[in-house]
Image (cartoon, rainbow, N blue to C red):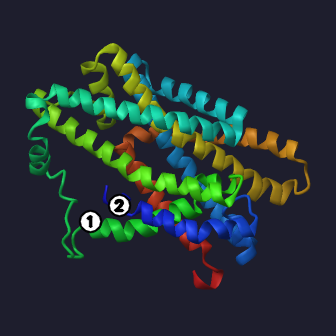
Amino acid sequence: MNVFLNVPLVMAFLIVTLVPFFYRTEVFTAYEYLEKRFDTKTRVLTSLLFLVSRGLATGVVLFAPALVLSVVTGWDTNITIVLMAVIAVAYTVLGGISAVIWTDVIQMFVLWFGAGLSIFIIVGALPAEGQGVIAVASQAGLLDSLNFNLDPTITYGIWAGVLGGFFLHAAYFGCDQSQIQRVLTSASIKQSKMSLMVGGFLLFPQMLLFLFIGIMLFAFYQHVGPPQLDNINELFPRFVVEYLPVGISGLVIAGVFAAAMSSLDSALNSLAAVTVRDFYAKFFKPKADEKHYLNVSRWATIFWGLYAMIFAFFAGNFGPVIETVNKIGYLSRILHDWASLPLGAR
């Protein structure tokens, strides 16, 4: 949670600096600028690192809704991974960035509704309607990161999250194609700035909401006893299936799907855009018409869907989903920063 405290400040920084900058450069992907600033090799290397790392992270994101569907239906996880991949690829191929944006809007409302409903149900299921939850979480060390101590040896603390998170999010929201594509495809600079502003103010309370759900869920299982799980990622889906009424559980599951699919379709679209713009159009068909590029981008989306699906088969072996995504993202951003340096500085 600490790293999200600075998101409004990061968005303000991007609105003043990178949004006008990218519009002036008239690029289609974030990596096109690197060729203008440095050389073709830098652009190609950075784009390639983005494709490989984002493809892997997309596989983890694909695993999340597939696992939920597996818990709900009792189907094998590999089958649900294939099913979710087909659904995500299909509407991204057919609708492109427009489908991504509009489905993300709908999914956001479903997500918030499902999260709020989950908290309401969990609070009602706890003794004394949730009293003492904070004490239980504190005793278990779940709130240790809420530490204002300036000691630099503390692994998790408020100041480490605020300072380190600023650069982390500035790189992610300002330079990662999966995020900056929303800025580049807006009709005007004003709309781009507005989208970043709204996202900046909504992201932190959203993450706070998820954190609160986790704390409440921990307190709940302290009360009823820990469940028998094959995978820690099954914890929340199993609570929904086993403890919520049928109609309500469906709404909450829909919220979980919304969260995962929102990230999945954006990633697939950005992977296809970088593939076409930074490789295909650059080296193979530099003067083809837009219809040709559109068809190639659809095939690229299918390819990256298969790539993510293959990695998703193994994603459950790497621990909690959120930690796996963050590890891949952290490594990819280090490699991106290194690749963006001129050759003499590496």
The reply, left or right, for residue 241 in relation to residue 166 is left
Position of residue 169 measured from the top left corner of the image (x, y, whole percent): 46, 62
Local crowd size for mark 1, using a 10 Å CA cut-off: few (<14), some (14–19), many (≥20): many
x 20%, y 38%: residue: 216
Position of residue 215 measured from the top left corner of the image (x, y, whole percent): 21, 42
Residue 250 sits in quarter: top left
Determine the secondary structure under disc 2: loop
For badge 2, the amino acid type reads Leu
x 30%, y 69%: residue: 160
Give the distance between the C-alpha atoms of the residues marked 1 and 2, in whole angstroms.
9 Å
Q: How many marks?
A: 2
Residue 115's place in the image compared with 267, above or below, is: above
Q: Nearer the viewer, residue 184 or 235?
A: 184
Residue hosting label 2: 5
Tell me, for residue 158, which label it has, or none: 1
Residue 246 sits in quarter: top left
For badge 1, the amino acid type reads Ile
The reply, left or right, for residue 30 in relation to residue 1 is right
Quadrant of the image containing the N terminus: bottom left
Quadrant of the image containing the C terminus: bottom right
Sequence-first tag of 1 and 2: 2
Instruction: Look at discs 1 and 2 and give the one toward the viewer.
Output: 2
